[in-house]
Amino acid sequence: MISPYGTVPKEGFIITPAVASDMKNPPFDKASSRFLIVRLSPYRDMEVSMSHLVLFDEIRRAVPTAYIDFAFLPPAPDRIQLDRIAFPWFFGRASGKVPQDFDAILVSCSYTLELVNLSWLLLQSGIPPGFEERCRKKETPLLILGGSGAVTAGAVISLRDGQLINSLVDAIFFGEGEGAIGAIALKIDAWKGSKISKRALLQNLSREIEGFWPCMEGYSASRRLHADRPALLASPLVLNGENADHVKLAITAGCTGYCAFCLEGWDRRPFHEKPIDDISAVLPELKKASGAIDIELFSYNFNMHRALPQIVPLAGRVFMQVSLMSQRLDILAEHPALVELEAASGKRSFTLGVEGISARMRTYYHKGIEDWHIQRSAADIMASGPRELKLFFIISGFEHEQDLLEFKELCEEIHARREETRRPIRIIVSAGFLVRLPFTPLQYAPLMKNRTTLSHIASRMESMCRQYGFEFRLAAPYGDYWADQLLSIAGSKAHEWLSATSRQQIVYDGALTKGAADSLDAFLASRPGHEALLDEKAEDFRPDFAFIERESHWALLRAHYEQAKTALENPASTRTSRSSRRRHGAAMGSEEETRASAERMRAMQQAKSSFPFRIVRVKESADLAWAVPAYRRSCLLRTLAMLAPGAEKVIFFCRELVIPHEWERAFSEAGRAFGLYGLRWYSIHGPHASALEKALVLASETLRAKAEYANSASILELQIVPQDRPPKPDSCSLTLSLPYAGADRLFFLRNAIEAWLRREHVTYTIRKENDALHFASSASKQKRPVHDAWLSASDANGYELSLIVGKNADLADLTKDLVEKGLCVLPEFSIEQWS
């Protein structure tokens, strides 16, 4: 594991030895090529994203001999540590290498604001910010930008009189990368050992790969769509994170709504749904490869898939939990049986994107939602017994008093419906300020800079929400909104400012550094054309990268904008338009069929709540010392599926016993303050006791027989426990290896252990037994947080601390002291025995 500054990162280890083994990287210096996949935000914000996993999968399949690594923006405490040793923030989490050591850096950008971190990547890595200088230096890694934020990343390029003169990246990929990223990686791998110049490579890639645009004057590209969209990622790499036992499966691509503000529907058009047979076929494979307990049917709006009532039970027969996230509320209202299906699947938190606070504003957004849609869907949801209902709105700044009164009426209606249920349903209203994005109809709209106006509308909404007992949240502060708006629409005009964000100490970490929006606003105000940027745009306005669309598309966007403007200026025209999306939704199966699916899901959920189980004792290797609980569960289920063919069909989930319950205090900081591996207990659950037993017996026997597997595996032993109740041990035997460093190490170790025992209020005596110091507790066993401790020399020219502890031992306190005193760097306890 890699920690450049020698201590445990605050975010933990994303790449543990277990993950590194699955990555199948060759030695770094032996690799045919080296790729660094960069996310410009922290892992905590990117964990549920699939982009970096798709990139990894594409490259690994195309170039088995390549070394592939990940870099994420570290959280603030870790950035401080890295700054102290002058080490780049964006380093390879598996290799510990800096970006300059790689042949290609693939940056996946999800949000426009993330781009402010790009200059940090360049500055700290010593990568020249100038395109021409990077081209001259073949040893400088190729820098390729892609992702859903690519079309709004105009600020990475610089124009003069309409001519491209510089770019912070070497190329940009527009569209869907599945099926193309592997081809790009192959070309880079072959180029590395050739005499071809970097410029020639970029030109060749532009000619051969659709969607690939070299940042050079005279070149263009088209938006690429995957031929068999949405692509199904059947074997995703599992990283060490809180969502490691959660997996996504895309069931649709694009959206038929074409809302005036939404980039997704326009940039990922046309809408396409995955055939149900393809989805059904990949489900078992996905479960086996991921070890996931929970599957999310991933889509921009999952209920647009016409076969959804059939897909949900199919997924429920394979996975323990089926999650359903974003959906169209009008489809939900027009197909009320869908609420029954979702509730039967265990959904207890619903989110409805209402967007406009009134009929007028929803027509402006081309949302296609009528009042009765909102009322019906909200009423049906609350009748289903949810835990919470979230309503999302967009504040444009154009809202009038009548719009706010309509919002109040809606709040009153939802409040009344909640009162009828007599349930404490949590209602959360979230609002965000409207960003007029390029490549959408509202790119032509005037910008809303007036903070007072926006804040007043938000304040009125919050007051109304409080009146009815709703929570109110702003999705982002004004500064982040305004910076996002300016950076998105100004594009290349903001290039100079974006290039200097690192020098201005501006970072985006869930929110922008204070003052960033004012800095950007002042910069653009000092440049020609600032007023035109704020005002309504003419018909011939084109954003950066306009070449990816045909001219007819801009006429279509303008026509949609004119419709939106008419709706805004003429309240009498607020009749909701019924788009092709509605006709698409109507093609869904009958309500009776959906209710039948809901009944099947209810029966499945009922059966799952009482699945038979067997208890197993597992011996983990040190590869799992820093794994979080979700990763351990995923690893165990993947191991069982590998050892016992077909196990993924009969095992649905596992639950760790002992440690997360009675031993919570002793081990609560495991994976953060210290590593922990060794003997653990799990309950393994499945629908059929006999099939479950058979799979576990086969897995246990296979594990014992395959010595070559045991030498490199995360799970070393698996033993079925002949009991149906969790064990209740009173003590745990642990060992901790402490490296040798200096003749006085024993003195300091002894002092640290004694200080810890005193803080634990343990009365002890020290005895010398053979070559060990025995810290013997003199209190009764029932009251002792620490029963015994031994410190002895180890075979590895260091020391070994052996402990017998009770449930209340504070191991985090001990390891913190050892690390702070420099007596241990990455403490890892091995659980040797439970008593």
Image (tube, rainbow, N blue to C red):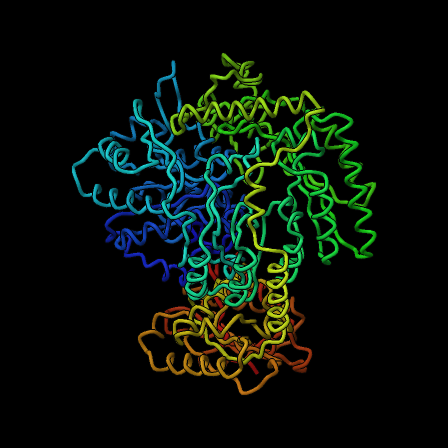
Q: Is residue 608 above or below residue 384?
A: below
Quarter of the figure with residue 87 = top left
In x, y percent, where is residue 478? 64, 30
Q: Nearer the viewer, residue 49 or 368?
A: 368
Left or right: where 121 falls relative to 10? left
What residue do we see at 74% from left, 51% from top?
Answer: 426
Q: Quadrant of the C terminus?
A: bottom right
**Residue 158 position in % (x across, y down):** 40, 22
Regarding residue 545, the answer to whether it shows in the image is yes
Residue 342 x, y percent position in the rendering? 63, 57
In this rendering, the answer to whether 147 lies above or below 813 is above
* Left or right: where 100 falls relative to 519: left
| Quadrant location of the N terminus in the rendered image | bottom left
- Residue 432 drawn at (x, y percent): 64, 35
Q: Depth check: 407 or 773 in front?
A: 407
Q: Is residue 741 visible?
A: no
Query: Image point 82% across, 56% down: which residue?
Result: 422
Could you say which is closer to the camera, residue 449 or residue 509?
A: 449
Front-most of residues 622 and 691: 691
In the image, is residue 827 above or below residue 119? below
When asked about the image quadrant of residue 107, the answer is top left
Q: Residue at horizontal 46%, vertical 64%?
A: 287
Q: Residue furthest left?
A: 195
Q: Residue at image x 18%, y 43%? A: 193
